[in-house]
Image (cartoon, coloured by chain):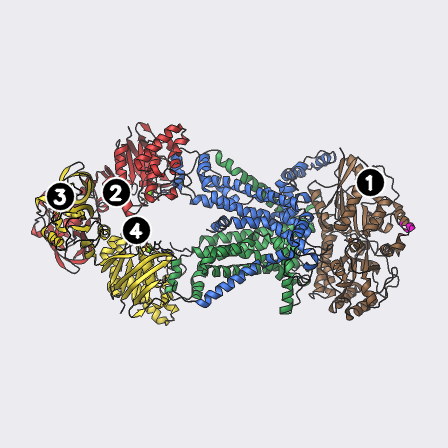
Chain colours: A blue, B green, C red, D brown, E yellow
């Protein structure tokens, strides 16, 4: 456009650079902190010249926080949630969009009621549920005053309910978070934009429902799946309250929770250099995923709005 | 909406929807029902002595000034977090939208905080804002002469958790605003320019009104975020303190339920939260229906 | 034998009846075109033949098989969709062979059939391309190819050209015509484009509101529309339709009391014979049968000339459309590109009533 | 195959390592059982983990719970009382050999021991000896407490002379500044003998004396004689280690950490200050934690549990534990042994706590605390105190509110068990 | 005075030159239409006039002001966009008054101007509606209204009708024509629709690849296209273009060695005068100047008749397109709707060379 706004243009760039710096500052600062020895990091103010202790601190964080184990757990949890959600919702959305059956509406509504409800609001009962998957049966037992039976089992070393607890287990970390309608909703929205003629053409070509799903729908959903992989991976990786509750065994703890152990606490010296190194390590995987898969991530984020 | 080209099959659709329904029933409906029941029970921490008390837990909550205060705190916290992150996101997006040539670069530089866990955001900012050695804290103390001490002062702690929470949401909002702006037909902006509107005018009179659906959507999403996902921020930074001044609702659920072991009250709080979310969701869908149309 | 016989077919969408009992006999190898305004039921009828919609009542037969309950793939029909419906993630070869693969044809058979179709359509060099790498016309051809390889006895086309630009549309029209000559199958073709209908069809079916209004060759429809609807629908610019009254003698038309025209003898006789005197009628006359005195015309009786005012002129180069008014009655006439008539001219408008149409004002049916 | 015994505890860093050494020693000493010790976080978190596990029927054999959780555990119905366990497993234990001030905290109303005391502590006052010397202040006595007024003067001197950036910091503020303050000054923390005599007790720590004490601390904040270090992070202990504060009140278990972390100054221990009006101060009460045996395991396993608990109580282990961490040696045998070795001559500060604990016959007010929902009550007290520190409430208001809020918790607890 | 003068204007997009130096003098109150294939630079030129694109080189003048560096709002131009670009969140009144409000016109002035424009366009009853509550044609009118109220000296239209359906397009075309008569402003109008160009323009500008090929009245372009591009672009069906050779005498054309035609005297003289003998040329003849002997024609010399074979017939009712071949050279001819000629017929094809065009085979420029 023929428009001369030199001052505005300059301001634009100045503020942009400022904005980026402000947004990036915590990380830059953490990066510097992670390179300093403990003496420097506890100086006030902390020097802004990077030190040479980066690897040392990284190693300290790694060992102290048992990050190897925890990153693995985080990875398993995040991938599990991602894969679980995507598979469950692909099937669900396919069923809802491409079939007409009596309970479809009920299925649809009941699934979508969960759309906005994060695990945090139903945390307590979900925890109970995960603690004892047989909860429903147990409550029946209680109702019929058969509690003594359970006690008998319990004291006689025959653990019936024990096996069904999801505490401190990968399924426990993963399954309750798979119960969310967001992915199903997004896939449904996407399927609705696929021209019906494509389905009709496939039908005329003699494709069955599952053939259509496998050969047409799935390949077409590739980018959407990629987008959701990014979003759900980040979501899974960053979970906090749920893993905090469901894991008590340090071997099952996820990295974001485990970081707690390297933040300086009342008993400790202020090893902020190590804490920052640990934070950087733990945030790295999802940040990389987002940066490298930006295109899909943005698509996935922005599309649901439409 | 129903597709007209459908497959007919007796069992397949049920089979396909089964995993979803199963997961939803087990980890949503059953717990939700349980939560509802629990909210009317009084129970010891071990669940061995329970009695049914109807709505006592709710009554207790709503007569408890601390719970009411927690509602207020949550309101202030969510409101401030949403307003801060949305306005900053909008501001940066508007700038980036002007800087056409480097838009992609800017996006890359701004997008990553989205991937940072709230808990980690809490740690990073705690390090910056800690009263004894945080740089930002130091700057605040030196330049503004404020006695910055979030360990002691509730308002400081509130500012601190808001900063940490808003920070990582900026990138989320930024992405939506940029996309929203790109969806506005350029011809509209051009038409306004020909009508004689300055860049500011165009922003106020055209861009902003047309972004209102995005704005509303982000409002809802940010509020949900600050209601729930910020748990990690609170937990790492203040544990609800000092003096309960950052004890937002979801943290209180955790504190009363898992630390205080008062399951009845905690469940009642969950039920209240659930109702809030359901209302927000309904509102959201109502509004989305009436979305402004760009062209036809 | 691939004749298609539609007998008393109804279609209900829920409680709404979209097709109200139609009957049609499509002959083997015939090229049938459905036209009609939007929402009249063209696509619905086609989709019932394809098996994409259930038939609510009545029967459909292809050859000697009742097809009501056959799955689409078993009907030996192939369909070309308006938006082509190519599988976006498959290349041309895979798009064309998908159906054959699902039917588990041997590999060589598939290959030879695809090759053959590709040659017919000039797609041989494009077999490895993905749909997005093709132009509109090429995509259209792939869609046809996908139909051809299945060697169906009936081809179904639903507005296959409406996504193309004018030039390409003309070109593809010729290709479809050529295809019909080559594959010699029955073709059922839906369009809203008159030119396509006129140029392609052996017979045209004009539909309105779920009814068939008229079936006939393009010429029949143009020359003898059975009612005002068909008359107004076929021909461009459309026929002028003016309410008039016919005198008791069936010899003179008076148009809204403004001017009168004596009917040609033949027409007057026919009307009189059928007892159509003294009634409200609608005069139909096509723009090309209205001339202005700017060159030599066929000699016509002087009383077919009426003074008119030129409202405005649309010169298209090769011809010119004249918008003229006789008092406040507007007519459209068509004349040469070389005409010198301009806006505001007073001209004698000549009604060539030999080519006139006359419809009953109440029933809108043709009286001649 | 060895039988596994799970032990969940809250011992981390310095103390955690000592725990680990003890476990290793036990595991090596026999080949029937193997104890697996797991740190489940801090005290609150361990208790929560334990309760959650009990609800999920995945409980460990032994759960370490801090003294605050005693009532909760005792009434839970999920435990296997220690006195019973030991006798079932065939151990005949002479309970009289144990420190009674400790045992009484963990006994039910029939005088039966419900959990095995493990790490018992009491708060004491640490001070930076270098600073004291520099300010020319004589070092405090290890047996006779100074008065709060004296402490006030000392701190003022040090701050005025700019020897210390701040005066006093206190960890576990509810425990050290209210619970123990009540005990030492023979004030009731709660009615019904601090809850020992019934669930229908009410809190009473908003007495004028306690209010005055808090008001004094608040007053000291003005000139930095008192510094609030928060509940967590870099808390009071760090301030002391960083020489930001001259005096530091915390559990005797702080010794382990200080020994390790303090390199560049001399520190020492003194009894907690006492008000001048309290001529004969009472004993302080204990803190720390005990080991609870949880129900729901097999007989075989309980044998191993008993063996391990017995092992821990052996004088040799107790002496090691005491020397390394500062926690009390739990039996008189061990205590006598230490005295005999002349250990307290060598390390006199190690004895300050135990002497403070034993300096008087416990009264109803100094025996200990037995309150339901004590975890929440502590949180409430912490919250309300924070409101004093940050000027939102006066000490009177805050303590009144704390009492009112705490009483609500007590009533809720009472309701459950009636 | 609102003439628009474009002098040596270039447009670069980055390194790519989209407009290669064009010159054009648009007179005051003239209705100028830009046509040309997609991507030829029509919109770019228009947008440079509007101030929405910078001018890379050259100058543009409106009236007596150089506008190169003026902001759009200061150019006294108004633009109607293809997608209308109505502000979706404002009602019709606000849409139309937005520009005036920004210019801080007094309230009464705004009101009266909007009222006036609304009356001209028949929008008075719609002033409170939001754009999404309007039909396509109404939106189009609001877009025009928004332009009118600003009383610009130049109106710019970028394909304003291409989003409308055929019927509405015809109607809106008439409305734009009427508007021009009423507001008497200069109008610059971009379209790819020939009919629009022919019927609306005072002068048409034909563009190709960033160049102007020809500027002239519709008639001039139709009758005297300067090159084969314009010749093929204007007219529907397009002109037949056949490579031929002109003998040394400039008296006879021989078409690809297949048949020869003697030129009319006038043309032959002209060619000879310009020394165009003995060269490769392209013969251009419009379908309407090719007739088949199926009725009385203008008398033509016998040697303009060539035997031809009817390849296929496209009857449109009112007229018929004939695709004929002289040996392997294809021609399109246009004849009456009543013709009886059918596919496979042998007919004499009559070249009415009075209306012929002749182009240089090398330069493609007209020789006549
Ligand atoms: N799936 C459906 N559900 C309900 N009504 C339908 C459905 N499909 C079509 N109809 C209705 O049936 C009637 C005929 O529709 P059809 O699609 O056959 O029209 P058409 O002649 O193809 O129109 P067009 O030229 O717009 O394609 C219309 O009134 C339409 O609204
Ligand atoms: N913003 C741009 N950046 C780069 N090239 C452009 C831009 N806009 C247009 N072009 C190029 O400039 C040339 C002219 O484009 P223009 O839009 O003027 O064509 P047009 O004649 O309006 O075509 P259409 O009929 O398709 O609208 C085209 O080659 C186009 O690719
Ligand atoms: O630090 P400890 O282990 O002595 O415990 C202190 C308090 O008693 C905890 O309640
Ligand atoms: Mg249709
Ligand atoms: Mg254009």
C-alpha distance separating marks 2 and 4: 17 Å
Q: Which of A2 and A156 is in front in this view?
A: A2
Residue denoted by label 1: D84
Q: Residue E260 carries which label?
A: 3
Residue occupying image coordinates x 19% and y 46%: E243
Left or right position of D387 against C309: right
Which badge, 4 or 3, is on the more N-terminal residue?
4
Residue denoted by label 2: C196
C-alpha distance separating marks 4 and 1: 93 Å
Kindly check if marks 2 and 4 are in contact, taking CB atoms under 8 A apart as contact: no
In the rendered image, residue D341 lying in the magenta stretch gets the answer yes
Could you tell me which quadrant the N terminus of chain B lies in? top left
Q: Which of C269 and D44 is in front in this view?
A: D44
Q: Mark 1 lies on which chain?
A: D
Figure check: C120 above or below D67: above
Figure check: B193 above or below E265: below
Classified by dominant secondary structure, the portion drawn in magenta counts as helix
Q: Residue E165 carries which label?
A: 4
Q: Is mark 3 on a helix, strand or loop?
A: strand
Q: Nearer the viewer, residue D128 or A113?
A: D128
In the rendered image, residue D271 lying in the magenta stretch gets the answer no
Q: What element carries label 4?
A: loop
Give the mark toward the camera: 4 or 3: 3
Residue occupying image coordinates x 60% and y 56%: A27
Residue interval drawn in magenta: D338-342
């Amino acid at each position: 456009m023929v428009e001369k706004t030199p001052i505005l243009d300059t301001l634009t760039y100045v503020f942009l650079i400022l904005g980026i710096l402000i947004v990036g500052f915590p990380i830059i600062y953490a990066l510097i902190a992670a390179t300093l020895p403990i003496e420097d990091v506890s100086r006030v103010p902390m020097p802004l010249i990077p030190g040479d202790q980066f690897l040392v601190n990284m190693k300290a964080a790694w060992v102290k926080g048992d990050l190897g184990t925890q990153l693995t757990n985080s990875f398993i949890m995040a991938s599990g949630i991602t894969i679980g959600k995507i598979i469950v919702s692909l099937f669900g959305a396919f069923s809802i969009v491409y079939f007409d059956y009596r309970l479809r509406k009920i299925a649809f509504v009941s699934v979508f009621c969960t759309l906005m409800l994060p695990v945090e609001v139903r945390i307590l009962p979900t925890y109970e549920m995960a603690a004892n998957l047989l909860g429903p049966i147990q409550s029946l037992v209680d109702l019929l005053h058969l509690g003594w039976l359970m006690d008998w089992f319990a004291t006689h070393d025959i653990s019936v309910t024990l096996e069904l607890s999801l505490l401190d287990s990968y399924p426990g970390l993963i399954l309750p978070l798979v119960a969310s309608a967001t992915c199903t909703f997004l896939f449904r929205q996407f399927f609705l934009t696929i021209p019906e003629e494509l389905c009709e053409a496939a039908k005329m070509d003699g494709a069955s429902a599952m053939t259509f799903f496998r050969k047409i729908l799935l390949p077409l959903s590739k980018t959407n799946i990629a987008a959701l992989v990014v979003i759900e991976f980040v979501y899974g990786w960053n979970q906090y309250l749920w893993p905090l509750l469901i894991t008590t065994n340090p071997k099952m703890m996820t990295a974001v929770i485990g970081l707690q152990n390297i933040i300086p606490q009342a008993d400790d010296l202020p090893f902020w250099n190590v804490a920052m190194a640990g934070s950087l390590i733990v945030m790295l995987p999802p940040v990389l995923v987002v940066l490298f898969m930006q295109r899909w991530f943005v698509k996935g984020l922005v599309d649901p709005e439409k | 909406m129903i597709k007209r080209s459908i497959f007919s099959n007796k069992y397949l659709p049920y089979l396909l929807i089964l995993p979803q329904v199963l997961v939803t029933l087990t980890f949503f409906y059953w717990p939700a029902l349980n939560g509802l029941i629990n909210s009317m029970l009084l129970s010891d921490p071990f669940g061995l002595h329970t009695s049914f008390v109807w709505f006592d837990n709710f009554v207790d909550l709503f007569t408890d000034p601390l719970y009411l205060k927690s509602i207020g705190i949550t309101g202030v916290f969510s409101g401030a977090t949403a307003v801060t992150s949305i306005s900053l996101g909008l501001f940066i997006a508007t700038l980036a939208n002007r800087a056409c040539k480097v838009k992609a670069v800017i996006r890359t530089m701004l997008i990553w905080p989205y991937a940072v866990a709230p808990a980690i955001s809490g740690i990073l900012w705690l390090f910056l804002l800690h009263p004894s050695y945080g740089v930002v804290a130091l700057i605040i103390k030196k330049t503004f002469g404020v006695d910055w001490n979030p360990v002691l002062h509730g308002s400081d702690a509130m500012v601190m958790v808001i900063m940490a929470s808003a920070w990582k949401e900026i990138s989320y909002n930024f992405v939506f605003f940029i996309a929203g702006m790109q969806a506005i037909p350029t011809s509209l902006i051009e038409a306004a320019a020909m009508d004689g509107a300055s860049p500011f005018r165009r922003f106020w009179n055209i861009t902003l009104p047309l972004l209102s659906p995005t704005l509303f959507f982000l409002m809802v999403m940010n509020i949900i975020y600050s209601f729930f996902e910020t748990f990690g921020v609170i937990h790492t930074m203040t544990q609800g303190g000092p003096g309960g001044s950052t004890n937002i609702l979801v943290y209180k659920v955790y504190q009363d339920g898992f630390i205080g072991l008062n399951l009845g009250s905690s469940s009642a709080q969950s039920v209240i939260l659930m109702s809030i979310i359901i209302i927000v969701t309904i509102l959201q869908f109502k509004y989305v229906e009436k979305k402004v149309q760009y062209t036809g | 034998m691939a004749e298609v016989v539609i007998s008393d077919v109804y279609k209900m969408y829920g409680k709404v009846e979209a097709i109200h009992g139609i009957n049609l006999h499509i002959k083997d190898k015939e090229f049938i075109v459905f036209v009609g305004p939007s929402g009249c039921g063209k696509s619905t009828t086609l989709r019932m033949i394809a098996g994409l919609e259930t038939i609510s009542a009545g029967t459909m037969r292809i050859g000697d098989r009742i097809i009501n309950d056959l799955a689409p793939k078993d009907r030996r029909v192939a369909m070309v969709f308006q938006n082509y419906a190519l599988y976006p993630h498959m290349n041309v070869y895979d798009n064309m062979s998908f159906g054959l693969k699902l039917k588990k044809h041997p590999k060589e058979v598939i290959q030879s059939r695809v090759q053959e179709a590709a040659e017919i359509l000039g797609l041989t060099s494009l077999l490895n391309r993905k749909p997005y790498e093709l132009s509109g016309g090429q995509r259209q051809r792939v869609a046809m190819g996908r139909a051809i390889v299945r060697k169906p006895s009936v081809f179904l086309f639903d507005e296959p050209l409406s996504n193309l630009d004018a030039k390409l549309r003309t070109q593809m029209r010729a290709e479809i015509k050529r295809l019909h000559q080559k594959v010699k199958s029955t073709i059922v073709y839906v369009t809203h484009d008159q030119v396509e209908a006129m140029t392609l069809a052996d017979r045209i079916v004009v539909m309105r509101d779920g009814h068939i209004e008229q079936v006939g060759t393009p010429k029949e429809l143009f020359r003898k529309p059975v009612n005002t609807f068909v008359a107004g629908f076929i021909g461009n610019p459309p026929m002028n339709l003016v309410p008039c009254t016919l005198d008791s003698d069936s010899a003179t038309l008076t148009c809204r009391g403004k001017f009168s025209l004596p009917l040609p003898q033949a027409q007057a006789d026919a009307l009189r014979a059928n007892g159509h005197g003294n009634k409200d009628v609608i005069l139909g006359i096509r723009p090309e049968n209205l001339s202005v005195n700017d060159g030599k015309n066929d000699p016509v009786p002087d009383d077919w000339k009426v003074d008119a005012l030129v409202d405005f002129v649309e010169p298209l180069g090769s011809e010119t459309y004249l918008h003229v008014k006789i008092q406040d009655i507007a007519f459209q006439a068509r004349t040469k590109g070389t005409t010198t008539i301009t806006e505001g001219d007073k001209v004698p408008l000549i009604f060539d009533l030999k080519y006139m149409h006359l419809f009953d004002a109440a029933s809108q049916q043709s009286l001649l | 195959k060895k039988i596994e015994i799970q032990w969940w505890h809250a011992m981390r860093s310095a103390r955690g390592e000592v725990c680990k050494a003890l476990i290793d020693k036990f595991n090596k000493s026999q080949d029937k059982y193997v104890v697996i010790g797991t740190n489940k976080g801090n005290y609150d978190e361990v208790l929560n983990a334990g309760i959650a596990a009990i609800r999920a029927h995945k409980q460990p054999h032994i759960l370490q719970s801090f003294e605050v959780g005693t009532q909760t555990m005792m009434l839970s119905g999920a435990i296997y009382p220690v006195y019973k366990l030991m006798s079932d497993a065939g151990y005949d234990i002479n309970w009289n050999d144990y420190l009674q001030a400790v045992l009484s905290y963990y006994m039910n109303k029939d005088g039966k021991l419900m959990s095995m005391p493990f790490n018992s502590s009491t708060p004491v006052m640490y001070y930076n000896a270098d600073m004291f010397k520099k300010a020319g202040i004589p070092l405090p006595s290890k047996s006779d407490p100074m008065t709060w007024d004296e402490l006030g003067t000392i701190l003022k001197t040090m701050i005025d002379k700019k020897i210390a950036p701040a005066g006093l910091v206190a960890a576990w503020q509810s425990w050290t500044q209210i619970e123990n303050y009540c005990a030492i000054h023979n004030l009731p923390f709660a009615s019904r003998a601090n809850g020992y005599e019934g669930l229908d007790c009410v809190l009473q720590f908003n007495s004028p004396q306690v209010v005055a004490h808090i008001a004094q601390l608040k007053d000291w904040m003005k000139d930095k004689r008192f510094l609030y270090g928060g509940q967590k992070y870099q808390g009071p202990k760090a301030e002391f280690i960083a020489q930001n504060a001259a005096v530091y009140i915390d559990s005797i278990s702080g010794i382990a950490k200080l020994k390790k972390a303090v390199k560049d100054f001399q520190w020492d221990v003194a009894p907690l200050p006492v008000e001048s009006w309290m001529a004969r101060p009472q004993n302080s009460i204990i803190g720390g934690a005990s080991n609870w045996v949880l129900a729901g395991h097999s007989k075989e396993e309980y044998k191993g549990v008993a063996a391990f608990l017995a092992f821990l109580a052996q004088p040799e282990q107790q002496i090691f534990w005491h020397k390394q961490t500062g926690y009390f040696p739990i039996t008189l045998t061990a205590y006598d042994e230490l005295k005999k070795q002349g250990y307290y001559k060598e390390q006199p500060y190690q004895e300050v706590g135990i002497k403070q604990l034993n300096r008087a016959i416990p009264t109803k007010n100094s025996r200990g605390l037995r309150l339901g929902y004590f975890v929440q009550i502590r949180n409430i007290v912490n919250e309300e105190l924070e409101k004093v520190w940050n000027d939102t409430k006066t000490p009177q208001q805050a303590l009144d509110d704390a009492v009112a809020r705490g009483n609500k918790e007590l009533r809720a607890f009472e309701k459950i068990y009636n």
